[in-house]
Image: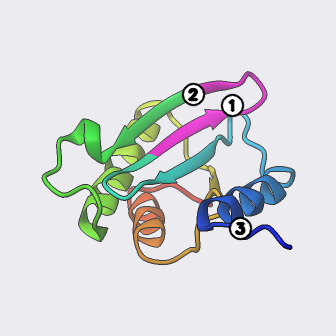
Amino acid sequence: MYKQIDKNDARLRRHLRQKGHIQGTASKPRVSVFRSNKQIYAQLVDDEKRVTLASASSLVLGLENGSNIEAASKVGEALAKKAKELKIEEVVFDRSGYVYHGRVAALAEALRKGGLKF
């Protein structure tokens, strides 16, 4: 019999497949996205030094409902603001195996509106 793969295992497989192609540096860090049922998280990562430069989440922002598109947009705006403070203008977007749709797309659009290029 074949083992049934659940949604998260399939997402993790996609994420690992992408990870070989997406690399962040100090001048052009990787924006890593994690989406749970209740919250959304994003962080700027320098993969060369293996350091998180900045992060934002709907949990830290104290949003009433962290699992909707408006929350994702606010997280994107907050992360873009922190990136500007660090004088970061270009990033590499890592969607972590999630489909570029809904909350992930809203977060990316908010990052672009905040002035980040990717």
Q: Which residues are magenta?
A: 42-52
Q: Nearer the viewer, residue 71 or 87?
A: 71
**Kind of residue indicated by mark 2:** Thr
Residue at 35% in and 43% down: 57
Q: Quadrant of residue 14?
A: bottom right
- Seen in the picture, residue 34 relative to 83 is either above or below; the reply is below
Residue 61 picture quarter? top left
Can you give x and y, in whole percent of width and height, for residue 87 in the image? 50, 35
Residue at (26, 59) in percent of width and height: 71
Of mark 2 and mark 3, the one earlier in the sequence is: 3
Identified at 68% across, 59% down, the residue is: 9
Residue designated by label 1: 26
Q: Would you say residue 13 sits in the magenta stretch?
A: no
Which of the two labelled residues, at mark 2 and mark 1, occupies the earlier sequence position? 1
Q: Is residue 10 left or right of residue 35?
A: right
Q: Nearer the viewer, mark 2 or mark 1?
A: 2
**Crowding at mark 1 (Cα within 10 Å: few <14, some 14-19, many 20+):** some
In the picture, measured across the screen, residue 70 lies left or right of residue 47, that is: left
Residues under labels 2 and 1: Cα distance? Answer: 10 Å
Which of these two is toward me, 40 or 9?
A: 9
Residue lying farthest to the front in this orientation: 1
Q: Is residue 44 magenta?
A: yes
What amino acid is labelled 1 in the image? Ala
- Give SS at disc 3: loop
Distance from the alpha carbon under mark 3 to that under mark 1 = 36 Å
Image: 110 above or below 20? below
Q: Which residue is mark 2?
A: 52
Q: Quadrant of the C terminus?
A: bottom right
Mark 3 vs 1, N-terminal side: 3
Secondary element under disc 2, as helix, strand or loop, is strand
Please give the residue where the numbered disc 3 appears in the rendered image.
5
